[in-house]
Amino acid sequence: MKKTRRDFLKLSALGAGMLPVAQSLAETPEATKPIVLSTWNFGLAANEAAWKILAANGRALDAVEAGARVPEGDPKETSVGLGGLPDRDGRVTLDACIMDEHGGCGSVAFLEHIVHPISVARLVMEKTPHVMLVGEGALQFALANGFKKEKLLTKESEQAWKEWTKKSEYKPVANIENHDTIGIIALDANGNLSGACTTSGMAYKMHGRVGDSPIIGAGLYVDNEIGAATSTGVGEEVIRIVGCHLVVELMRQGHSPQEACQLAVERILKKNPAKAKEVQVGFLALNKNGEYGAYCLQKGFTYAKYDPTGNKLFDSKSNF
């Protein structure tokens, strides 16, 4: 029997209606989980602490907090927590944020005298109606919740600052020799994502400067339906494009974590090509399937990955 145009349209509509069902019946690849990713070489040690929790079927939120606390408490790491290089006035000020699988988030900025700002940020998320506390208010909150006031400036960092004051040049490179952040993102055995980001900021910054690290959507973003992203490098450039939110939204559009990171870096490059050649910015991303990727402006950004195959360090792909 000859089919009319109307019959053809009916069949086409029926086929289109059946398509989502066919797609839902198709096998989806098994997600790689648990998995944790951290920025820079010290991400290896951070991952070790996080993996102890993930391997025991623990929550990604607990894992990223535990991982972030490792460089925070290490006086030899001069870009995070205790021993962090100070601002131009010789004061160590810390920024951190954390985000869980429910969209909950907490942040502290311009915090002094507290070794583990990431744990203070978690309490801001869990104990207050706010997202961010800063400066003296953040310190008051930390002390009220049992944190101890400690001296963060070590002899080594103080000596480096005094040497810097001889010329007082502010040249934020932020690469492997002068990195400024640990960002850590994880997918746990239950398929939930969380992330954390903590830093002492750019060395010898202006007193009061806050970068991208404590800003939800800039230095860190987690969407449990899609994925998570964190950033490192010169925070001002990341803030200008709301970088990590952008990376997650690009993954929502169907880009792989690697592609999303590269597209975000390219946006920074497009906005200011001359400036982009002088600074470092890197993104690290993870999706719900345990797929991951990283991309940066300048060669030199490293990141660590711990999954059931082990803990390994990688060099990120770069634009320059």
Image (tube, rainbow, N blue to C red):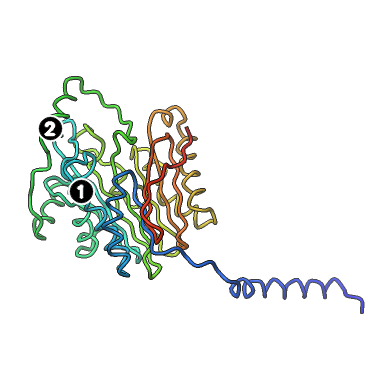
> Disc number at residue 158?
2
Identify the secondary structure beneath mark 2.
helix
Residue 244 in picture, x, y percent from top left: 40, 49
The single residue placed furthest to the front in the displayed view is 309
Residue at image mark 1: 72
Under circle 1, the secondary element is: helix
Decide: few, some or many residues near mark 1? Use Cα within 10 Å; few <14, some 14-19, many ≥20.
Answer: many
Tell whether 226 sits left or right of 143. Answer: right
Q: Quadrant of residue 47?
A: bottom left
In the image, taking residue 117 as reference, residue 171 lies left or right, namely right
Amino acid type for the residue under numbered disc 2: Glu
Q: Say whether residue 114 is left or right of residue 254.
A: left
Which residue is more in the foreground, 305 or 25?
305
Tell whether label 2 touches label 1 (CB within 8 Å).
no
Q: Residue 264 location in percent, x, y?
A: 46, 44
Where, quadrant-wise, is the N terminus in this rendering?
bottom right
The earlier-in-sequence mark between 1 and 2 is: 1
Residue 178's disc is: none
Residue at 17% across, 35% down = 86
Could you tell me residue 185's position as x and y percent? 35, 56
Please say if 46 is above or below 188: above
Q: Quadrant of residue 90?
A: top left
Query: How busy is the neighbourhood of tag 2: few (under 14 within 10 Å), some, or many (20 plus)?
Result: some
Q: Amino acid at mark 1?
A: Glu
- The answer to whether residue 306 is left or right of residue 72 is right
Q: Where is 279 relative to 292, above or below?
A: above
x, y (%) of residue 166?
A: 17, 20
Q: Residue at x 16, y 52 (%)?
A: 138
Q: Quadrant of residue 178?
A: top left
